[in-house]
């Protein structure tokens, strides 16, 4: 992102939502920093300075605006020119890695020394890793104070602070406010959940996204109730549920069960990936709609996202079960896996009563158990091989520094071919350009039966081929 005043100030004047989250503007006369879409009166150009992220603005001495709420700004899209390693480090810190691990542990997980980690983050973001972590905790606390009736002590610990005293001191030091000042729900009573708001760049084709996710679940782990997408969640030994629905054209509200508060930072990051909230749909749709074969699909469903996943193994299991069978048949078999390997859970929603199967649970099964669920012998062997590889951390199905290595590892497993690998890359690895060229529906829309021909013609869809695939699939499922 070009942060020169000549480039940024006209965007602030126009309040152009396409740039929301790509930079922040600090205002010297007020000492606050805002999103470029802030509705306050536009300050004079000479009073504005521009920053690539919230942490940089806070390091320069600015505090977050109470009106536009920088903590709700959407994250960086894949189009942004951020080195992959730096972005993944940033994401790990945003997910709370430094709240539970040391700098050395985080660095070791990326094959770096702590000195290298500091240098990469400082070079790319202009602040130290600890400054990113502090800003993450403060912004999460600010959101909980503003939107939830949680007690101050619960806000402090959910945000990653070691004590209420530390929380009060750091909050006042950086924001020159007392946490009590932001309490909007002072008299409200906490129920069984806390609302979390997640910002995104519109438009968002919510019904299509939620329908895709729920339509490939078991019904007992995820479903739709009205406009709300419901599902059970398990992260690091904490189990609970979420209920998500659009709050406005740029904010998604997610009710999170109180049992998940200890892993709230990790959950927030996973939810952003699940709903693909860091995409830039205006940019993506503009490019795809320029292709005659895709134009009507894109215009019919603007803002269509690539559905992600909360757990890479769950997604890969569903993909293998769905090989060469209908969605309905695959859903039936997956439901049997949920019944056999998913733990039971109590939620406020009668339909949701089980957690998704884990790699560890499936890895200790034998072939006869898996065949009894409706798999062929070869497919059962594939599932077992994958479960053992993931449980042993030999294959990590998360957005990776080396997605090509993960692809190679998947292809080396028996029964996993290019279609399954690319499908997993789309949804579990978060590759916006992943492309299952052997997909029958995609070949049909391009009027060919040869994957190589489709691969060649789809070059025009780069770097958004995963989105092109989703548009085709959605068009066919909707009868378009």
Image (cartoon, rainbow, N blue to C red):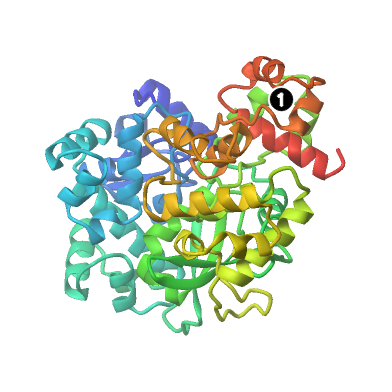
If the image is split into quadrants, where does the N terminus sit?
A: top left
| Residue 264 shown left or right of residue 317 in the figure | left
If the image is split into quadrants, where does the C terminus sit?
A: top right
Residue at position x 61%, y 54% in the image: 248
- Name the foreground residue: 412 vs 273: 412
The answer to whether any part of residue 67 appears in the image is: no
The location of residue 326, given as percent across then percent down, is 78, 48
- Name the foreground residue: 10 vs 367: 367
| Residue 120 shown left or right of residue 213 in the figure | left
The location of residue 48, given as percent across then percent down, is 32, 34
| Residue 328 shown left or right of residue 320 in the figure | right
The answer to whether any part of residue 31 appears in the image is: yes
- The residue that label 1 is drawn on is 289
Residue at position x 58%, y 59% in the image: 367
| Residue 301 shown left or right of residue 109 in the figure | right
How many residues crowd around disc 1 within 10 Å: few (fewer than 14), some, or many (20 or more)?
some
- Residue 464 location, quadrant: top right
- Residue 432 location, quadrant: top right
Residue at position x 28%, y 45% in the image: 55
């Amino acid at each position: 992102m070009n942060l020169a005043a000549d480039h940024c100030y006209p965007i602030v004047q126009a309040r152009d939502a396409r740039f929301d989250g790509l930079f922040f503007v600090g205002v010297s006369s007020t000492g606050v920093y805002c999103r470029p879409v802030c509705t306050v009166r536009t300050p004079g150009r000479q009073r504005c300075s521009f920053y690539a992220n919230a942490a940089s603005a806070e390091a320069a001495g600015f505090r977050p605006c109470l009106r536009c709420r920088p903590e709700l700004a959407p994250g960086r899209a894949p189009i942004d020119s951020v080195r992959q390693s730096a972005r993944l480090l940033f994401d790990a810190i945003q997910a709370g890695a430094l709240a539970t691990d040391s700098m050395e542990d985080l660095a070791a997980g990326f094959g770096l020394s702590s000195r290298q980690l500091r240098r990469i983050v400082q070079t790319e973001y202009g602040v130290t890793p600890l400054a990113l972590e502090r800003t993450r905790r403060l912004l999460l606390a600010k959101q909980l104070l503003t939107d939830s009736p949680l007690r101050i002590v619960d806000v402090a610990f959910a945000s990653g602070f070691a004590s209420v005293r530390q929380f009060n001191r750091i909050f006042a030091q950086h924001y020159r406010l007392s946490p009590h000042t932001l309490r909007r729900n002072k008299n409200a009573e906490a129920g069984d959940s806390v609302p979390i708001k997640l910002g995104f760049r519109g438009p968002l084709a919510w019904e299509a996204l939620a329908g895709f996710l729920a339509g490939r679940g078991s019904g007992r782990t995820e479903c739709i109730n009205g406009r709300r997408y419901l599902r059970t969640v398990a992260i690091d030994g904490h189990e609970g549920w979420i209920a998500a629905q659009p709050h406005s054209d740029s904010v998604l509200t997610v009710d999170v069960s109180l049992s998940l508060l200890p892993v709230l930072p990790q959950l927030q990051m996973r939810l952003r990936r699940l709903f693909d909230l860091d995409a830039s749909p205006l940019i993506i749709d503009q490019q795809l709609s320029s292709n005659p074969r895709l134009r009507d699909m894109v215009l019919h469903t603007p803002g269509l996202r690539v559905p992600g996943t909360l757990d890479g193994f769950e997604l890969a299991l569903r993909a293998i079960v769905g090989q060469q069978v209908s969605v309905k048949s695959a859903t039936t078999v997956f439901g049997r896996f949920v019944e056999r390997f998913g733990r039971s859970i109590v939620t406020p929603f009668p339909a949701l009563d089980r957690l998704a199967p884990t790699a560890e649970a499936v890895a200790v099964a034998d072939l006869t158990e898996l065949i009894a669920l409706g798999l062929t012998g070869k497919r059962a062997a594939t599932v077992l091989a994958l479960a053992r590889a993931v449980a042993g951390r030999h294959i990590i199905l998360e957005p990776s520094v080396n997605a090509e290595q993960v692809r190679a590892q998947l292809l080396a497993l028996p029964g996993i071919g290019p279609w399954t690998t690319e499908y997993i890359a789309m949804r579990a690895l978060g590759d916006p350009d992943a492309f299952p060229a052997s997909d029958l529906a995609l070949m049909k829309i391009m009027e060919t039966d040869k994957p190589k021909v489709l691969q060649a013609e789809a070059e025009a869809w780069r770097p958004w081929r995963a989105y092109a695939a989703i548009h085709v699939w959605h068009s066919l499922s909707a009868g378009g």
